Amino acid sequence: MQMQTGRHWQRSVLAAVTVLVLSACNMGDAHEESLELGSSEAELSCQVSQQCADGTSITCGSASGICASGADNGGWVECNGSRTYCPTTTPCTCESTQRTSQGYASGFNCPAAWSLAEENALVLAEQACPRGLCNVVTTQGTCTRVNTTTMRAGFTATYSCMGPPNCQ
């Protein structure tokens, strides 16, 4: 008889635990919270527009709420750090500001390391100048032994950017 009472007690405990777990996992409440999160994200979103000189307009939007616009350089909009300029027929020219980027790399010998370092310096320069580079001068830096099989070298690129940013 005690054996049946023990099983009955185990079933009762199991049923009580099941009810508690199902009560804690009320799917209706979780769904409502999900809807509330979506609506608060919508409140944070933004959208900006800029009227361009040629009569067109440019627009961007952001779910994170980070938007800006400006009229300089023919007009632009920016969302989440990505800037878009108004179209223009302004020709690109070499700007007067000189810039410098430095690249470093390792290789099995100095010429290999210098080659990669120069490539790295030019990639950094191209990232800084989306419309292109001009007046580029590269300078080979030092090359030093890291260990028995590796050399480390540096390269410097001095350059100017083509501009203004929205030139064609």
Image (tube, rainbow, N blue to C red):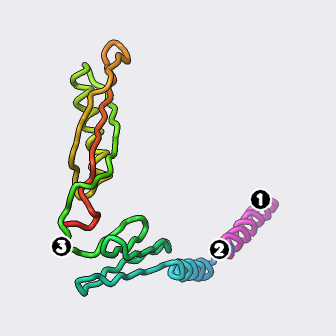
Instruction: Using the image as rendered, state which of residue 19 and residue 7 is in the foreground.
Output: 19
User: Badge 1: how crowded within 10 Å, few (<14), some, or many (20+)?
Assistant: few
Q: Toward which corner of the image does residue 165 lie, by quadrant?
A: bottom left
Three-letter amino acid code at the position of disc 2: Leu
Instruction: Using the image as rendered, state which of residue 30 and residue 159 is in the foreground.
Output: 159
The earlier-in-sequence mark between 1 and 2 is: 1
Q: Position of residue 13 (x, y in %)?
A: 75, 66
User: Badge 3: how crowded within 10 Å, few (<14), some, or many (20+)?
Assistant: few
Q: Where is residue 14 in the image (x, y as percent from the top left)?
A: 70, 66
Q: Is residue 130 magenta?
A: no
Instruction: Using the image as rendered, state which of residue 87 and residue 82 is in the foreground.
Output: 87
Say the numbered circle drawn on residue 89: 3
- Quick one: quadrant of the N terminus? bottom right
Q: Position of residue 31 (x, y in %)?
A: 56, 80
Which residue is tagged 1? Answer: 3
Which circle, 1 or 2, is nearer the viewer? Answer: 2
What residue is at 27 percent from the left and 57 percent from the top?
Answer: 130
Left or right of residue 3, residue 113 in this image: left
Does 34 appear above or below 80?
below
Q: What element carries label 2?
A: helix
CA distance for labels 3 and 1: 92 Å
CA distance for labels 2 and 3: 66 Å
The earlier-in-sequence mark between 2 and 3 is: 2
Say the numbered circle drawn on residue 22: 2
Q: What stretch is highlighted in magenta?
A: 1-23
Q: What element carries label 1?
A: helix
Q: Does the magenta stretch include residue 20?
A: yes
Tell me whether circle 1 and circle 2 mark residues in contact (CB < 8 Å).
no
